[in-house]
């Protein structure tokens, strides 16, 4: 990976020649190409607070649906219920960690939370019917 033309100062806008600071994730590789250029680098577009803001509504919606499935399965398939219980605990842990992340501004609680909750509900609704 190479740095921008002016790698010293913080990035302030697109095209300024600076490299954004943060953790980068190499999230996939094209196995058909043997060169380093086949690596996909995920840039630090969203900070920890943004990720936490998106995690909270998802982790509020998903466990509720999982609990509904546990209620339906508890007499039919106890092993499935045990597996779902473990997933619910994991989801709750993600939710609780995200709540510890500092929240800034009024945008995220009033706009982002309802939009992501609604979208998550929609994905689950469609998944149950397809």
Image (tube, helix red, strand yellow):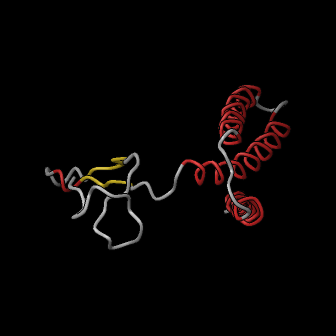
Foreground of the two, 42 or 15: 15
Q: Can you say whether 103 is above or below 78 in the image?
A: below
Looking at the image, which residue is at 78% across and 64% down? 110
Foreground of the two, 18 or 47: 18
Quarter residue 19 falls in: bottom left
Looking at the image, which residue is at 80% across and 45% down? 64
Looking at the image, which residue is at 72% across and 26% down? 82
Foreground of the two, 1 or 82: 1
Foreground of the two, 101 or 10: 10
Name of the residue lying farthest toward the left: 34
Q: Is residue 102 left or right of residue 24?
A: right
Q: Can you say whether 88 is above or below 42 in the image?
A: above
For the C terminus, the image quarter is bottom right
Name of the residue lying farthest toward the bottom: 15
Q: Can you say whether 125 is above or below 71 in the image?
A: below
Q: Position of residue 95 (x, y in %)?
A: 70, 40
């Amino acid at each position: 990976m190479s740095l921008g033309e002016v790698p010293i100062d913080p990035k302030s806008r697109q095209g300024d020649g600076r490299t954004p600071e943060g953790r980068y994730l190499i999230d996939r590789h094209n196995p058909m190409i043997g060169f380093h250029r086949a690596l996909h680098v995920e840039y630090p577009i969203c900070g920890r607070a943004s990720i936490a803001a998106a995690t909270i509504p998802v982790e509020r919606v998903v466990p509720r649906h999982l609990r509904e499935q546990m209620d339906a399965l508890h007499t039919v398939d106890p092993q499935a219920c045990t597996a779902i219980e473990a997933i619910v605990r994991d989801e709750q842990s993600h939710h609780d960690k995200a709540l510890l992340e500092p929240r800034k501004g009024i945008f995220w609680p009033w706009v982002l939370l309802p939009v992501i909750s609604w979208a998550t509900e929609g994905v689950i609704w469609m998944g149950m019917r397809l």
